[in-house]
Each structure stands twice: as structure tokens, then as C-alpha cells.
Image: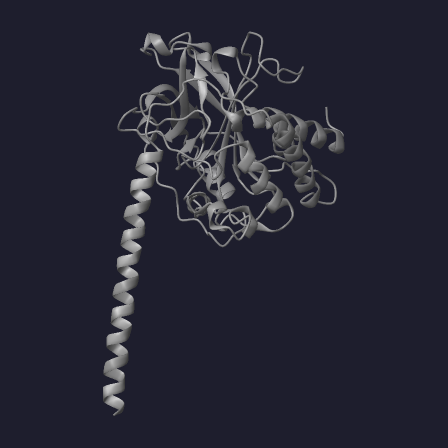
Amino acid sequence: MLKRFWLWLGRLLGKVLLFLIVVGLLGWAAGEAYYSWKFSGPVSSEEEIPADEAELTQGIIEDAIRVVEQHRDNTRVMRDAHAKAHGCVKARFTVLPDLDPALRQGVFSEPGKTWQTWMRLSNGNAYPQFDRVRDARGMAIKLLDVPGKKLLETPASAGNQDFVMFNHSVFFVRDVAEYKLNFAAQADGKKVLAFFPSLDPRTWELRHLFIALQTLSPAPESPVTTTYSSVAPFKLGNHAIKYRVIPDPQSCPPYELPAQNTALPNFLRNALYQQLSLDRVPACFALQVQRQNPDHYMPIEDTSVEWSEAIAPFETVATIKVPAQDFDSREQNLFCDNLSFNPWHALPEHRPIGGINRLRKAVYEAVSVYRHERNDTD
């Protein structure tokens, strides 16, 4: 009797499992068909600005100030994101000598030109935490003494051209409207509502949840061994493009980083210090651009969609060399903390485009002003 029961139960569970597998496969096939239809070209090569974007942006600024205040320490107001730096280092940014003439725009207009640069490497969270915690990682690049009128200019940033990137190819929100709902939920400490704003399944953002989980990745071996992407698009002359920075170890002396103690809270800073300051070995990168092909689904206004490399491969436009240096001093760390990076610190030839970049212009500047006023820095 008992044997027959277990055989019956086993057959029942097998049928249930088979049913769930079939339903899952059908759901996956339906999802693939839906997104293949939804994510098909052509798309606009120009910006499309929603009527309510300015109002939404003001609400996001208020939420960003709340996040800054929630995560401030006893003496300083920190950034609303990428609060923890692994280091702020000097670098040399050199335009390729044989660059395609169509890409010779802005800071790339003179082949072979070298720009002196600051590079900030960071964790993405708004509160400093152990490096082993899953997180986004950021790279911000500031070219110095760049002549010309900038799109956003203060006395401190008049000579700057900034590039701001992080280590994932897409963003976990599509536009400013979704960012407002997502960020407000996080600011209220209700992270689950960021992707499930109501009981209605039609409002759930499962694809964007998966992107967010992928963005919160394990720590790399070192901040100089990972790829960083602009995520949002930019103009480069007449082209709409995205940027990325990839490690370029073949352009530097061979180097193998000694094993790091990943239990230490700041082991990524230690890895950077080991290579640049102790072992005196430089780090090399390549800056690349990907040109939009509007005949395919490469949208300007949706940062959750990856532009296909098979259709639009990345092209190297510049190299970046971080020389051996001593960077981990109190003075340089404070200087780094007070630096403001903004993709709108840019020549018109590098104009940021798309809703997330328009949002950045307002939010970065508002938080920077607030942070510097509260910290009493110029």
C-alpha cells in the first residue's frame, strides 16, 4: 500500500514538473517573440522629450537630496551614488594617430593629441560598503585644459571634458518616468516596489529587475580589469554613439596582480595601490565608440536596450594610460572627493542625448552644488 502511494506520488510530481517545464518554455518562447517584435527598428536618431519630464526631474532631485542626507557621515555630505572611491589617479588620454576622419570631433579632432586626465574609480552604492558586496563599479574621466565653451560650465569646470561610465552595458530603467518611480521607492526604503509598483502584473518590470541584478555584480580582481560603459547615448559630431572603456593590457608591461585578501573592506583600493604604487606598473585602457544604426533597434530614449555589436561594432578612438604613481594620500583623496564629474561638462560635439542624460544634467549639478555647500568647499 505504502509502495503504491509513493509510486503514485512520484508520477504525480513528475507530471507537475513536466507541466511546469512546458509552461516555462512556452513563456520563454512567447517572451522572445514579444521582445523580437517590440525591439525592432527603425528608430529615431533624434531626441524625443516627454511633456512631463521637467516635473519628474524636479521630483528626482528632491529624492536624491533625501538619499544624500540619509547616507551622510558625521562630517561630510557624500555623493548620491558612487560615494566610495577606490582612488583618484592621474592618466594620459591619447587620441589615435590614424583615427577615422568621420570621428575627428571635439577632443578627438587632433589625431595623436594627448590630454592630461583625472580618473576616479568607485563603487556604485550611495553608502560606502565592503568591496566584496555585490555592486556596480564606476569610472569617471576628466580631461583637463580643454579649450572651448562647454555645455555646462562653472569656473571650476570650464576646462573640463568629462566621461562618466559604469560596468554594465545597459541601465535598469528605460526613461525618466520609470526612474522617478524606481528611485522614489529606493529613497523610501521600499526596494521591492522599485520593480513591482503595484499588484497589477502589467506594471511589473521583470526584465529591468534582471538587469539590476546583473549590474550588482561581484567585485572584479581590480578596478583596472573591468569594462565600463556610458549606457546612455551621446552625439559625436553628426553621429549618435555610445562610449565604453576596455582594459588594454597588451599596451602595458605584463603584470599579474598578487592575490588580494577579499575579506578586507577596501581590497579594490589595495589592488590599485599594489599595482600603481608598490609594483610601479602602469594600467592601460582603450576608449571606444559605437555608432547608432537607426535602421535597427538602437533607441536614443531607452537606456535598458543594448545596441547590437553585431550590427554596430565598437571602434577604438583613444588610449588611456594610468602611469605608476603614489595616489593614496589624504590630500589627494580629499581632492578626489571634492571633484564633480558630469557628462554635461562637455564640448557641444560631445553633447549627451536621451532622457537619462537630460536627467543627469539637472540631478548631478543640483547634488554637486548641495554637497559642496554643505561641505563648505569651493
Which residue shows up at 57% across the image and 27% down it?
360
Tell me where residue 327 appears, x and y as whole percent. Answer: 55, 32
Answer whether residue 341 is visible to the viewer in this image: no
Which residue shows up at 66% across the image and 30% down it?
58
**Seen in the image, is 140 located left or right of residue 113?**
right
Which residue shows up at 67% across the image and 39% down it?
68
Q: Furthest residue to the bottom?
A: 1
Tell me where residue 280 appears, x and y as whole percent. Answer: 44, 33
**Seen in the image, is 57 located left or right of residue 9?**
right
Which residue shows up at 28% across the image and 66% down it?
17
Tell me where residue 176 appears, x and y as whole percent. Answer: 55, 32
Quarter of the image containing the N terminus? bottom left
Res 376 quadrant in image: top right
Where is 281 relative to 156, above or below? Answer: below
Where is 366 relative to 20, above or below? Answer: above
Answer whether residue 60 is visible to the viewer in this image: yes
